[in-house]
Amino acid sequence: MGKVDAPSRAVVPPIHVATTFIRDPDNQYRTGNVYGRPDNETIREAEGMIAALEQARAAFVFGSGMSSAVAVFLALQPGDHIVAPRVMYWALRGWLIKDAASWGLETTFVDMTDLDAVEAAMRPGRTKLIWAETPANPLWSITDLEGVARIAGKHGARFAVDSTCATPLLTRPLEFGADIVMHAATKYLNGHSDVLAGSLATNAVDDFWARIQRNRAAMGLILGPFEAFLLIRGMRTLALRMEAACRNAMELARRFANHPQVLEVLYPGLESHPGHAVAKRQMKGGFGGMLSIRVRAGEGAAIAAAARVKLWKRATSLGGVESLIEHRASIEGPDTPCPRDLLRLSAGIEDVEDLYTDLDRALPPA
């Protein structure tokens, strides 16, 4: 993470903003740079950092997490079948339901924590992709990556994992048999709530990866150089931020698990969580900075509590240095699998005593 810029010897990388590049006298482009839509040195540096973090052969960055995820699906062929989790990032779930069909893709949603359900959803010869998310937003359910990878391999399907909330510091899905790992880099990789970005990483630089690359170039899904620079800046402090977020989330989960106004705490670091054993096996160094609490007094009390906090910020997104709180069911609508009494918490890096006291005071009396 401490790469030095060779020409200037600067410890911070320069921002390359050029959109076009000079040809060699024999009409070649030996720098590899032709045009700004597919080519940029700042972007390549960000990609190199992500590939190193994931211990992958290659990585691409995109203009958002959604564009990176959609690029994978658009690399499939019309008629292909997808298996995806019922609990997953809501905007991507909506795209699969509403828009993927117009591209000739069909999706079956399953309980991704149940390997038998995943196996039962497979369609021999037609299922080309299993998409998982772990921990899965906002219930923080855990997918057995090795188990799903075995199913994918058995059926000749690719296996892609949204590992946004685990980050490469806690889980590297490629090590568990995944083919592609995706991050909404807006979240933890950047960590400062000031960049929209996404990424993909792979160990197989094959025809499928080449289709993703062509889609990125053709549709202009590339990240801007200034945003890539900010993403690089964010990743330089990823380990420090994740350590603090994991520590705060674990402490908050333990305290609220015994809180009289809290019906349930959803956090894979708790032994009471149904996915704890799997999480303990495939998450190293912590269980993430995301947790959810269910307010015993119900939906109205949950919304009111979110309105009363002072230190927590009532806003969407996650993974920043600031702690965020959100009533997810209001965002996701009537079809959400999210309980109406649930508050999603993104633990930041503030003092944990202040975070606990702030939310404790905001919760209604028992």
Image (cartoon, rainbow, N blue to C red):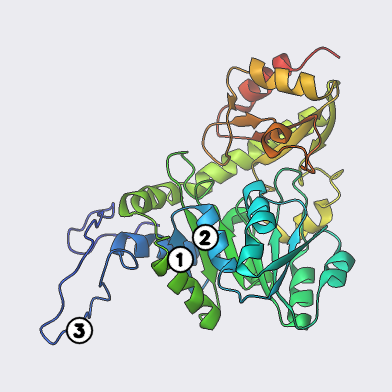
Q: Which amino acid does label 2 sit on?
A: Ser
The percent coordinates of residue 223 (x first, y second) are 39, 56
Q: Which amino acid does label 3 sit on?
A: Gln
Under circle 3, the secondary element is loop
Label 2, residues with CA under 10 Å away: few <14, some 14-19, many ≥20: many
Q: Is residue 202 above or below residue 134?
A: below
Q: In this view, does 326 lie above or below 268?
A: above
- The residue lying toward the viewer, choosing from 17 and 219, is 219
**Which residue is drawn at the image coordinates 25% and 72% (left, top)?**
34
Label 3, residues with CA under 10 Å away: few <14, some 14-19, many ≥20: few
Q: Which amino acid does label 1 sit on?
A: Phe
The percent coordinates of residue 192 (x first, y second) are 46, 39
Q: In which quarter of the image is residue 359?
A: top right
Residue 116's tag is none
Mark 2 or mark 3: which comes first in sequence? 3
Dots 1, 2 in contact, CB < 8 A: yes
Mark 3 or mark 1: which comes first in sequence? 3
Tell me the residue that label 1 is attached to.
60
CA gap between label 3 and label 1 equals: 24 Å
The percent coordinates of residue 292 (x first, y second) are 74, 36
Q: Is residue 340 visible?
A: yes
Residue 28's tag is 3
Tell me the residue that label 2 is attached to.
68
Q: Can residue 258 be seen in this view?
A: no
